Amino acid sequence: MTELANLFVWRRENVVVVGVTGEIDVSNAKEVERAVSAEIDRDSDGLVMDFGGLEFMDSSAVHMLFALSGRLRHRGLGFALVALADSAPRRVLELSGPQPAAWIHDTEEEAIAAVLATA
């Protein structure tokens, strides 16, 4: 994807799951957003982004997540995140307010169930 971030995409139960490793910051957030958006098709029930391998994210990554979530919500699709406890990305999300904190789940299974519950 970029020198900073790599994306790995798979599907489970019609949910697009995007694993992200590396970093998302102002230099690559738009590119990551475009790449993730391109994976969502009309057969998708929603999106889970797995940040288990993400080492760093800044406020531009949070803005990217709000944009993705808004577009998915507009289409009636679910959105959730997987972030490891005590990880830097999880702390950034929890400090970003109640909405980003509500997206967070501990496991991919929990996140997929949350997406399917809203689809």
Image (cartoon, rainbow, N blue to C red):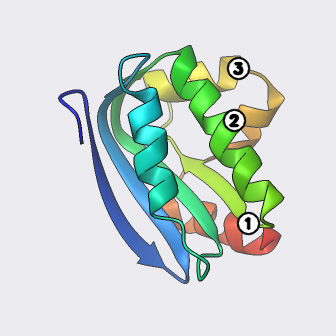
Q: Nearer the viewer, residue 66 or 19?
A: 66
Image quarter hosting the N terminus: top left
Q: Give left or right: position of 28 versus 13.
A: left
Examine the image and state in which quarter residue 76 appears.
bottom right
Secondary structure found at label 1: loop
Question: Which amino acid is tagged 3?
Answer: Ser
Q: Nearer the viewer, residue 78 or 114?
A: 78
Q: Give left or right: position of 50 versus 6.
A: right
Residue at the image position 67 percent from the left and 38 percent from the top: 67
In this picture, is 79 found above or below 59? below
Examine the image and state in which quarter residue 88 appears.
top left
Examine the image and state in which quarter residue 14 appears.
bottom right
Mark 1 → mark 3, Cα distance in angstroms = 22 Å
Mark 1 → mark 2, Cα distance in angstroms = 14 Å
Q: Give left or right: position of 41 versus 11.
A: right
Residue pointed to by mark 2: 66
Residue pointed to by mark 1: 77
Mark drawn on residue 93: none
Residue at the image position 64 percent from the left and 53 percent from the top: 80
Whether label 1 touches label 3, CB < 8 Å: no
Q: Nearer the viewer, residue 116 or 41?
A: 41
Q: Position of residue 24 (x, y in %)?
A: 39, 26
Secondary structure found at label 3: loop
In this picture, is 109 found above or below 90? below
Residue pointed to by mark 3: 96
Q: Residues within 10 Å of mark 1 (few under 14, many from 20)?
A: many
Residue at the image position 47 percent from the left and 78 percent from the top: 12
Q: Nearer the viewer, residue 101 or 78?
A: 78
